Structures are given as C-alpha cells and as structure tokens.
C-alpha cells in the first residue's frame, strides 16, 4: 500500500489500492463487481413459436382471452408469461400459463427437468390455475416424470405444413390383421322362406335396399375385434324386436332374426408411426392427441409389410381408457376375407335388434 506525507496535524490520506490487471482485465474485473443480469431475450424464432401456440390456444377456446409475451408483477420482481390463457370454468376465473420452448433437437436437445422445476416455482408466484410447457423438441424422461408428479402439462402443438412446428410425434403403434373365412348366413322366419331364398347370393337379402349380409359381416368384425384370441368357429345371432320386412331379389320375405357363422384368426405387428394434425395438441403424459373442431388427424408411416411381427400385447384391452373431449385413440385393423366394398351402405338394424344381442355375444 502506498502513502504520502501530510502536513502536520493533518490526517494521513491513503490512496486506494492499485489492482495489477493483466491479460484480460475485463474478465478479472467482472469477478469483483456485482453482476447485472439482463432479462431473457426472446428471439424472432421464439416469438414466432409463441404466436403459433397462442393461435392453437384460441382455436381450442374462442371465448378465452389469450395473450403472448406478457409481463406481470411478481413477489420478487416482474415475471414473464410466454402465453397466458384466461377464462372461466363454472363461473370461476382460470389462468393457464404456457411456457414455450422452441428448442432445436440437434443443437440443444429435448426440454429437461430444470425447466419443469422453474415453471413449478413460477406458477405459484403467478397464482396460475394450470401450468403447461409446450416444447418444439420433445421432453426428457426425467422431465416427464417430474411433470407428472407436479401436475404440470407437457405438450407439443400440431399443425400440418407449418414451418414453425419442429416437433415430430412418434409412437409405436400396434397393428393387427383379421383374416376371415367360411362365411355362413342363416335367416330365421315364422313362415317358409326357402323358395324365396333359392336365388340367394351374397348381399341379395336387403333391408330398405341395403345388404343384410353386409350388416352381419360388420357385426362379425366387431366380435372378432373384441375377441382377438379366439381360434374356433363362432356364430353370432341377432333377434329382431318384431318381424321385419326384407326382400331377396324380387321376393319379399319376413324375418324374425338372422345369424352369421365364421372363422377368423388375428396377426399382430408393431410399427413406429408419426402423428400429425391440421391443428391439434399432443399430450405427452397421457399419450393422446387432441384436435380442435373439424380438424383432422394424420397417421404417417403405416406399412403392414414392413412392420415387425409380435404377439398379442399383454396389456391389450378392448375397452380404451377414459378420453377427454377431442381426444382420440388410434387403432388400425386390417381386414382380409370380408366382402365389404366401400360403396356398400349398411342398413340401420341396430334399433330393431334386442339390446343383449348387440353386446358381441358369441356362441361357439
């Protein structure tokens, strides 16, 4: 430390220490000074993604007030909301906060758990009813686990042909093919109809100009679809609530019921497919896609010939889990051996059949 001589009775005046700054003085000086942290910058690409998310939100609820890039006071300073959705549920005000993460999968990877932690803290400061992260690159496994435990939504937006959408939704889909054979149709009547059926061929018996055989084949398909492990001949019977008028060619007949006998077998295969929609949302935690209004789903990459053979999945069930409004479960079933042309319209017979016979009851 340096000092200089002072006049008598004058206090000694000390000079401040001189710092020997070498090399990169700015970097060393920064270590001695409090850091001023700037507010996070939103790039033009990030703003475009925010705008896309807000557009999708408005499409799902036109009555909600949707804002983007909004800053609000918080307990420790201002807080930003990438997309805020305000509305009412049963007359109660609701605030949904959506964090938009427009990451590049190749450069920065998927959205990780630290962003779930950050949003979990922010939603309490904001008093948000619902908190959601919308990712353009997917999520890591630990982020999904944390979000599920904390009740934070994890989504991607779907919009076919929109360059702002980078996320690719891939799922392993279970395909199956049902092979039918040895069809036998039986018609029950309280009168003798043998002569009227002499000219019978497939689809010649009609109800209101529509094929009864086609309806029976469709009911057989429903039976096979919900009973994939059966490997024996089956017979499905349908009793009408009252005798109904049909015709076979030019011959009128009255039937009290009908049945169809058939055999079938089921093959299973796995394939990774891509999901898309004209406008929709993919929920990672539920594994469900949701569309708005008249928008459509797209399933890309389905090819039975290149799919991998597999056994009946152990967790398979014909009864799907509960769906939320607009959600859809994708199931692809290929049918072989059923003569149902696209042009064939089915008769409206369900309302004339005893309800218990429509429960896919089968008689071996």
Image (cartoon, helix red, strand yellow):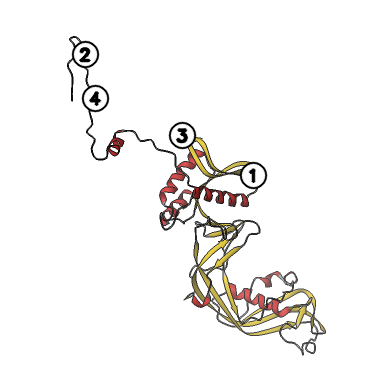
Write down the residue under mark 4.
16
Quadrant for residue 299, please give it.
Answer: bottom right
Secondary structure of the residue carrying tag 4 is loop
Q: Which of 198 and 29 is in front in this view?
A: 29
For the residues labelled 3 and 4, the Cα–Cα distance comes to 36 Å
Quadrant for residue 11, please give it.
Answer: top left
Residue in the image at 54% along x and 63% along y: 275
Secondary structure of the residue carrying tag 2 is loop
Identify whether 272 is placed above or below 213: above
Give the x, y percent position of residue 209: 78, 77
Write down the residue under mark 1.
90
Write down the residue under mark 2.
11
Mark linked to residue 15? none
Q: Which of 56 and 342 is in front in this view?
A: 56
Give the x, y percent position of residue 247: 80, 81
Secondary structure of the residue carrying tag 3 is strand
For the residues labelled 3 and 1, the Cα–Cα distance comes to 32 Å
Write down the residue under mark 3.
77
Mark 3 or mark 1: name the one nearer the start of the chain: 3
């Amino acid at each position: 430390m340096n000092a200089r001589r002072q006049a008598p009775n004058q206090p000694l005046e000390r000079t401040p220490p001189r710092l020997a700054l070498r090399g990169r003085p700015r970097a060393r000086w920064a270590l001695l000074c409090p850091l001023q942290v700037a507010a996070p910058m939103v790039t033009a690409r990030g703003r475009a993604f925010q705008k896309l998310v807000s557009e999708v939100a408005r499409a799902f609820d036109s009555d909600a007030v949707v804002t983007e890039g909004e800053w609000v006071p918080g307990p420790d300073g201002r807080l930003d909301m990438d997309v805020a959705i305000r509305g009412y549920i049963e007359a109660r005000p609701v605030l949904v906060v959506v964090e938009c993460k427009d990451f590049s999968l190749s450069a920065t990877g998927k959205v990780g758990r630290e962003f779930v932690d950050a949003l979990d803290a922010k939603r309490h400061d904001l008093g948000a009813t619902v908190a959601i992260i919308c990712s353009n690159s997917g999520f890591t496994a630990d982020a999904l686990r944390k979000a599920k435990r904390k009740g934070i939504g994890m989504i991607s937006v779907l919009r076919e042909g929109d360059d702002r959408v980078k996320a690719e939704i891939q799922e392993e889909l279970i395909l199956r093919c049902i092979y039918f054979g040895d069809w036998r149709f039986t018609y029950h009547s309280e009168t003798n109809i043998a002569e009227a059926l002499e000219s019978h061929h497939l689809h010649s018996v009609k109800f209101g100009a529509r094929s009864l055989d086609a309806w029976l084949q469709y009911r057989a398909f429903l039976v096979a679809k919900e009973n994939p492990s059966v490997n024996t001949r089956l017979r499905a019977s349908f009793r009408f609530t009252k005798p109904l008028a049909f015709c076979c060619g030019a011959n009128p007949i009255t039937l009290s019921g009908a049945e169809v006998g058939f055999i079938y077998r089921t093959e299973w295969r796995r394939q990774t497919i891509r999901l898309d929609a004209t406008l929709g949302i993919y929920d990672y935690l539920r594994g469900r896609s949701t569309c708005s209004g008249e928008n459509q789903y797209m399933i890309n990459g389905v090819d039975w010939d290149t799919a991998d053979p597999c056994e009946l999945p152990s967790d398979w069930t014909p009864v799907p889990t509960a769906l939320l409004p607009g959600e859809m479960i994708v199931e692809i079933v290929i049918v072989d051996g059923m003569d149902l042309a696209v042009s064939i319209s089915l008769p409206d017979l369900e309302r004339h059949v005893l309800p218990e016979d429509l429960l896919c009851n089968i008689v071996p």
